[in-house]
Image (cartoon, rainbow, N blue to C red):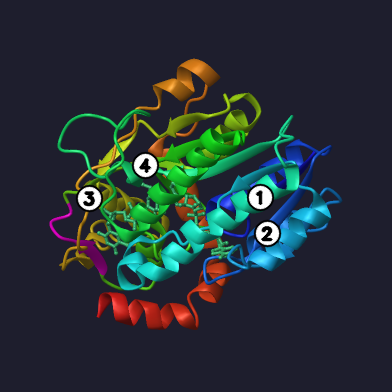
């Protein structure tokens, strides 16, 4: 089987590419990635020479290039992760999110449709999406697969839009598809613009920890390798035309999470108890900040037998250990463009 994974040099994509390349030697995995600031081939160094793996550098918004690629390699399945993925950046530059997340997805859908021309036996277009498409929850309740879409940020609106197009191609052209909407991921190789790796990096460097608003926003955290395992299950056993919610059954208020992170960091860095917490600084809130996300992942559990395998304390500890022993990776990705982004976002 030839599988195209888009965005495979990014955070979640790199874990998925590794899982598939190692677990399925009979598949050929093509990893297509534009290597934006968020994509990094360092993430895949250990598997880059495997015979069932090919990296392709390219942009999903380049229609001519994408059509040529599909005609050349005849991808039987697509697992589409390539995206602009950071909410704060979407507030600064919404159009970049429409280009990659909406137009890029459309270009892939068209290329897949034009290649197989209705001959869809054993084919699948798998779209990786987010729980943010559902908007925000109040203090209670959970997102289920039937919750109405109600996105609040340019990022989530662009992901909602691409989900709708995937579903529409299924209905209109009979294209076999599946969509999963996942909660917040954490783990090794995440770019340090997202909460957990940003705060780990700042604690290492004794920089302030910018908590948005009052810190009472809630997210549902999932260890990235558990997400990759869930994608593997849905890809092989999920029902076509279905949506599955994936989450960690693991809600944390930001401020409580940050305090746990600070405590673990103090211990690992041999710093006096309480020193990292002193770095917490409450800053201006994110516009349109969603109060709470929480996933009901019971469909994944009942139908596919999936559940998270790592507790949050364990996963967080492993994540911190990885960043502490990969300071070169951190230094490389935080040089150059990152500094400009940081100044603009936080000063
Ligand atoms: P990421 O930002 O770490 O990686 C995105 C990857 O896409 C990068 O390697 C980047 O180079 C590539 N890319 C961006 N624009 C491209 C383009 N035009 N053409 C080709 N490649 C391009 O993102 P992530 O956190 O790994 O998220 C991956 C996917 O999972 C996204 O679709 C995101 O919406 C979704 N998702 C993320 C989370 C999360 O918590 N991180 C949760 C649920 C869903
Ligand atoms: O829910 C899934 C989504 O999770 C994914 O679709 C997105 O790609 C991913 O970026 C993530 O979105 P969030 O906005 O929830 O993640 P982020 O790490 O940016 O922020 C997590 C929470 O922490 C959120 O409430 C905002 C807050 N925060 C974030 C940053 C970067 C801060 O308080 N300070 C910060 O500096």
Residue 131, labelled with which disc? 4
For this orientation, the residue located farthest to the top is 302
Name the residue at 57% across, 71% down.
328
Mark found first going from the N terminus, 2 or 1? 1
Q: Secondary structure at mark 3?
A: loop
* Residue that label 2 marks: 32
Vertical side of 38 occupied by 110: above or below: above
Boundaries of the magenta span = 209-215
Q: Do the CB atoms of the residues marked 4 and 2 lie less than 8 Å apart?
A: no
Q: Secondary structure at mark 4?
A: helix
Vertical side of 236 occupied by 135: above or below: below
Image coordinates for residue 58, horizontal then vertical, percent: 67, 67
Image coordinates for residue 47, horizontal then vertical, percent: 76, 54
Does mark 2 have its CB less than 8 Å from ligand 1? yes
Does mark 3 have its CB less than 8 Å from ligand 2? yes
Residue 290, labelled with which disc? 3
Image coordinates for residue 309, horizontal then vertical, percent: 50, 30
Q: Check residue 213 for magenta coloring.
A: yes
Q: Do the CB atoms of the residues marked 1 and 3 lie less than 8 Å apart?
A: no
Does mark 4 have its CB less than 8 Å from ligand 2? yes
11 to the left or right of 341 = right
Name the residue at 26% across, 71% down.
208
Residue 182 picture quarter: top left
Q: Do the CB atoms of the residues marked 2 and 1 lie less than 8 Å apart?
A: yes
Spatial distance from mark 4 to mark 1, Cα to Cα?
Answer: 21 Å
Mark found first going from the N terminus, 4 or 1? 1
Mark 4 surroundings within 10 Å by alpha-carbon count, few (fewer than 14), some (14 through 19), many (20 or more):
many
Image coordinates for residue 28, horizontal then vertical, percent: 80, 45
Residue 279 picture quarter: bottom left
Q: Secondary structure at mark 2?
A: strand
Mark found first going from the N terminus, 1 or 3? 1
Q: Secondary structure at mark 1?
A: strand
């Amino acid at each position: 089987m030839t599988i195209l994974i888009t965005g495979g040099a990014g955070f979640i994509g790199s874990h998925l590419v590794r899982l598939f390349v190692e677990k399925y030697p009979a598949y050929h995995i093509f990893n297509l990635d534009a290597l934006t600031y968020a994509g990094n081939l360092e993430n895949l160094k250990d598997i880059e020479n495997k015979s069932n793996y090919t990296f392709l550098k390219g942009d999903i918004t380049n229609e001519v290039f994408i059509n040529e690629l599909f005609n050349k390699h005849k991808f039987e399945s697509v697992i589409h992760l390539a995206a602009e993925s950071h909410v704060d950046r979407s507030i600064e530059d919404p159009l970049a999110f429409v280009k990659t997340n909406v137009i890029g997805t459309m270009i892939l859908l068209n290329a897949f449709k034009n290649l197989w021309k209705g001959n869809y036996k054993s084919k699948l277009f798998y779209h990786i999406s987010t729980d943010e498409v559902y908007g925000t929850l109040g203090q209670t309740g959970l997102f289920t697969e039937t919750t109405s879409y109600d996105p609040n940020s340019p990022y989530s609106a662009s992901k909602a839009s691409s989900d709708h197009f995937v579903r529409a191609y299924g209905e209109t052209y009979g294209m076999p598809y599946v969509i999963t909407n996942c909660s917040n991921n954490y783990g090794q190789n995440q770019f340090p613009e997202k909460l957990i790796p940003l705060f780990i990096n700042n604690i290492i460097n004794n920089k302030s920890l910018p908590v948005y608003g009052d810190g009472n926003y809630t997210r549902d955290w999932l260890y990235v390798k558990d997400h990759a395992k869930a994608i593997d299950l849905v890809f092989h056993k999920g029902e076509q035309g279905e949506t599955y919610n994936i989450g960690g059954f693991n809600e944390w208020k930001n401020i409580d999470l940050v305090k746990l992170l600070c405590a673990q960091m103090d211990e690992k860095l041999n710093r006096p108890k309480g020193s990292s917490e002193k770095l917490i600084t409450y800053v201006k809130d994110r516009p349109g900040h969603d109060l709470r996300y929480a996933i009901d992942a019971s469909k994944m559990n009942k139908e596919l037998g999936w559940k998270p395998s790592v507790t949050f304390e364990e996963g967080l500890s492993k994540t911190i250990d990885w960043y502490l022993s990969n300071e070169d990776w951190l230094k490389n990705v935080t040089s150059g463009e990152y500094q400009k982004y940081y100044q603009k976002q936080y000063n």
